[in-house]
Image (tube, helix red, strand yellow):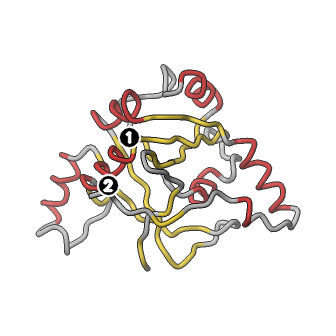
């Protein structure tokens, strides 16, 4: 199964998605970054794929994930996260031993996971989509330095879900995600 990063991006930012309970989302939109309700001590996962986010949060129906945020972050920061990420599962082609990989996981503030991309109904597609888990100083930089804009897209996602559920074709209404390459 091939791997690719597909995202909404421009010259300076890339969009990632996260889902939260209403209090965290409302505070983030109001502040333009995450506030007191957001736990800096926990690993947080960012996803460039809208449909993977919709699959993960059940199109805004899962408890604690009712609100979806589109978060535009600096591309240079995202690129650095990808470059320094350690895979969430052991890969013998990248590490000499399981123990070496475990040590890399312990030492890293960034994890990457490649999950099957999803269609509008949540069915897996033939390629994998990236999500990044960040913790420690990486989360602090994310919250304090890297976020350019936060947009609550919950109403948009719910409207798409309702249209999909009524049998309408929503493909032309989805975010236009293009193949993303890391800058050099």
In x, y percent, where is residue 44? 42, 41
Residue lying at 42% horizontally and 45% vertically, measured from the top left = 12
Q: Is residue 128 above or below residue 154?
A: below
* Residue behind mark 1: 43
Q: Is residue 117 above or below residue 150?
A: below
Q: Which mark is residue 152?
A: none
Residue lying at 75% horizontally and 42% vertically, measured from the top left = 155
Give the side of residue 63 with respect to residue 79, left or right: right
Q: Which picture quadrant has residue 142?
A: top left
Q: From mark 1 to mark 2, how far is it between C-alphas?
A: 15 Å
Q: Residues within 10 Å of mark 2 (few under 14, many from 20)?
A: some
Check the picture and name the quadrant holding the N terminus: bottom left
Give the side of residue 117 with respect to residue 154, left or right: left
Residue lying at 59% horizontally and 28% vertically, measured from the top left = 29
Q: Secondary structure at mark 2?
A: helix
Check the picture and name the quadrant holding the C terminus: bottom left
- In the picture as drawn, the residue positioned furthest to the right comes out as 166
In x, y percent, where is residue 86? 26, 56
Q: Which picture quadrant has residue 4?
A: bottom left
Q: Secondary structure at mark 1?
A: loop
Marks counted in the figure total 2
Report if the CB atoms under discs 1 and 2 are less than 8 Å apart: no
Q: Is residue 107 above or below residue 114?
A: above
Q: Residues within 10 Å of mark 1 (few under 14, many from 20)?
A: some
Q: Which mark is residue 82?
A: 2
In x, y percent, where is residue 104? 18, 53
Q: Earlier in the sequence, mark 1 or mark 2?
A: 1
- In the picture as drawn, the residue positioned furthest to the front comes out as 11
In x, y percent, where is residue 124? 58, 73
């Amino acid at each position: 199964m091939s791997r690719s990063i597909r995202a909404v991006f421009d010259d300076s930012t890339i969009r990632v998605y996260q889902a939260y309970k209403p209090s965290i989302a409302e505070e983030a939109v109001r502040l333009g970054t995450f506030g007191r309700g957001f736990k800096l001590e926990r690993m947080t996962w960012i996803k460039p794929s809208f449909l993977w986010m919709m699959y993960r949060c059940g199109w805004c129906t899962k408890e604690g994930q009712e609100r979806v945020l589109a978060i535009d972050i600096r591309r240079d920061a995202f690129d650095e996260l990808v470059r320094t990420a350690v895979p969430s599962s052991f890969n013998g082609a990248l590490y000499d031993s399981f123990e070496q990989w475990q040590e890399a996981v312990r030492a890293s503030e960034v994890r990457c996971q490649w999950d099957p991309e999803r269609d509008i109904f949540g069915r897996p597609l033939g390629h994998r989509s990236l999500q990044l888990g960040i913790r420690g100083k990486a989360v602090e930089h994310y919250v304090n330095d890297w976020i350019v804009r936060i947009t609550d897209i919950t109403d948009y996602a719910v409207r798409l879900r309702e249209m999909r559920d009524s049998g309408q074709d929503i493909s032309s209404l989805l975010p236009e995600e293009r193949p993303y390459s890391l800058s050099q």
